[in-house]
Image (spheres, rainbow, N blue to C red):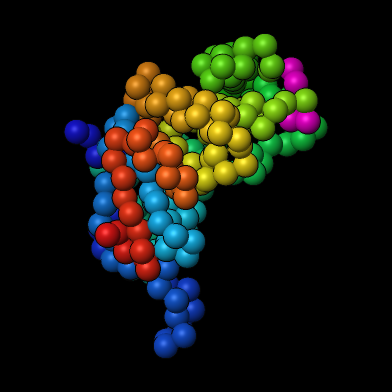
Amino acid sequence: MNSLIESINITKKFGESESAVVAVDNVNMSIYEGELLVIMGESGSGKTTLTSLLGCILRPTSGSLIIDGTEVDYDSEDLSMIRREKVGFVFQLFNLIPYLTALENVIIAMDIAGIKEHEAEERAKELLTQVGLPDRMDHRPSQLSGGEQQRVSFARALANNPLVVFADEPTANLDSRNSASIMQLIEKLCNERRTAFAVVTHDERLRTDADRILEMQDGRIL
């Protein structure tokens, strides 16, 4: 199985000396093509910090990260470029721009990634259709349900054709029906696009949908 992202002894500390908080402690793990990885653990266990390290939002205190076969050089590489080209993010609060339509919210992500206007619009339409919103493209977030807004955020996360999408509590603000629908969507995208999804969650119901589960406690993988 093809490893897309691999962490080697990765550690993240906040603060210095004796008062430092070790949020992620010497973690070794990989994310593989097309898999649905669910990362679970109590609040404060290090789940979100770990995915922020794997997605190059945070720099580790020590350890190394390999993405698509190449080790990340934190001294010389532009991490924002890695985020634009290699990974996507979905958040529990959706983070859509309220005055833009669903289509425009996806197009703007492609614009940031450097995709030209006509191509961006066509790809955005394809993605919104793929996530089940072919008839909602011209609606603004306030005109969409919570589940529909989350689907737009998934389309936006796929705008740069990422290797891995990190989803932080993507069902936290959804009812059980919409939560199940979102997990079905993730499984569909894993299977059809071969995109890997790493989902951080407290929701025990998501265990049954995972290809693999990582349990975290005190910054370590159990």
Q: Where does the image place residue 215, in percent across and percent down from the top left? A: 33, 54
Instruction: Provide residue 54's location: percent of width, then percent of height.
Output: 39, 51
- Region of the chain picked out in magenta, as a range: 138-142
> Where residue 193 sits: x, y (%)?
38, 22
Residue 108 colored magenta?
A: no
- Whether residue 139 is in magenta: the answer is yes
Quadrant housing residue 49 = bottom left
Q: Residue at position x 45%, y 25% from top?
A: 184
Question: Does 77 sit above or below residue 129?
Answer: below
- Residue 77 seen by the camera: no
Q: Is residue 75 left or right of residue 8?
A: right
The residue at 42%/63% (across/down) is 45
Question: Residue 18, relative to residue 198: is it above or below?
Answer: below
Q: Nearer the viewer, residue 61 or 146?
A: 146
Q: Is residue 32 above or below residue 194?
A: below
Position of 98 with respect to 198 (left or right) is: right
Q: Is residue 76 left or right of residue 32?
A: right
In this picture, residue 97 sits left or right of residue 38:
right
The x and y percentages for residue 105 are: 67, 29
Q: Is residue 80 visible?
A: yes
